[in-house]
Image: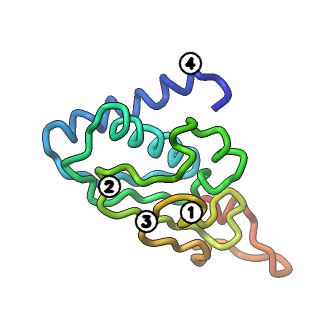
């Protein structure tokens, strides 16, 4: 997010995969994790806002352990994306995050438009030590 040239290339790789599917009227689901949620969100906003691609709809946009929940990341989004508005082509936005995941967190209203926000799911397969979960395990769960 600090090198605009790399940022453009990464988002372009995402849009190179998604754009042809959308233009062919294929209904898709997008599942993104960690930093991939940032790439997917900015790529979808670019396609909707800059290119005017608003339909057909993406059935579900799922974010898991989303870096979009981090204030410093939100501040580095493209200026027009900092409002958290959902790209028009998305039917349903779902955010999932495991309890103890230091990277992910709630998105709905922070400022993102998400239909379902589950910020404290059980960290599957993670054991706590003295009541504290390993954040890496929680993020990967």
Residue position marked by numbered label 2 in the rendering? 90
Whole-angstrom CA distance, mark 3 to mark 4, is: 30 Å
Secondary structure at badge 4 equals helix
Mark 3 crowd level (few <14, some 14–19, many ≥20, 10 Å Cα): some
Residue 99, located in which quarter of the rendered image? Answer: bottom right
Between label 1 and label 3, give the one nearer the viewer. Answer: 1
The numbered dot on residue 94 is 3
Q: Earlier in the sequence, mark 1 or mark 2?
A: 2
Q: Earlier in the sequence, mark 3 or mark 4?
A: 4
Neighbour class for label 4 at 10 Å: few (<14), some, many (≥20)?
few
Q: Quadrant of residue 46?
A: top left
Residue drawn 63% across the image and 57% down it = 69
Gap between marks 3 and 2 measured at Cα? 10 Å
State which mark lies toward you, 3 or 2: 2
Compare marks 1 and 4 and give the one earlier in the sequence.
Answer: 4
Residue 5: mark in rendering: 4
In the rendered view of the protein, which quadrant contains the N terminus? top right
Please name which of the two marks, 2 or 4, marks the residue nearer to the observer: 2
- Report which residue position mark 1 lands on: 107
């Amino acid at each position: 997010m600090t090198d605009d040239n790399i940022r453009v290339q990464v988002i372009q790789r995402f849009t190179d995969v998604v754009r042809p599917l959308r233009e062919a009227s294929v209904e898709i689901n997008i599942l993104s994790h960690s930093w991939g949620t940032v790439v997917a969100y900015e790529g979808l906003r670019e396609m909707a806002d800059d290119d005017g691609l608003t339909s057909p709809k993406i059935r579900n946009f799922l974010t898991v352990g989303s870096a979009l929940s981090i204030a410093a990341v939100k501040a580095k989004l493209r200026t027009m994306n900092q409002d958290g508005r959902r790209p028009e082509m998305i039917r349903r936005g779902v955010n999932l995050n495991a309890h103890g995941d230091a990277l992910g967190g709630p998105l709905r209203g922070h400022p993102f438009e998400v239909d379902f926000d589950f910020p404290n799911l059980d960290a599957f397969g993670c054991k706590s030590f003295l009541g504290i979960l390993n954040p890496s395990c929680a993020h990967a769960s």
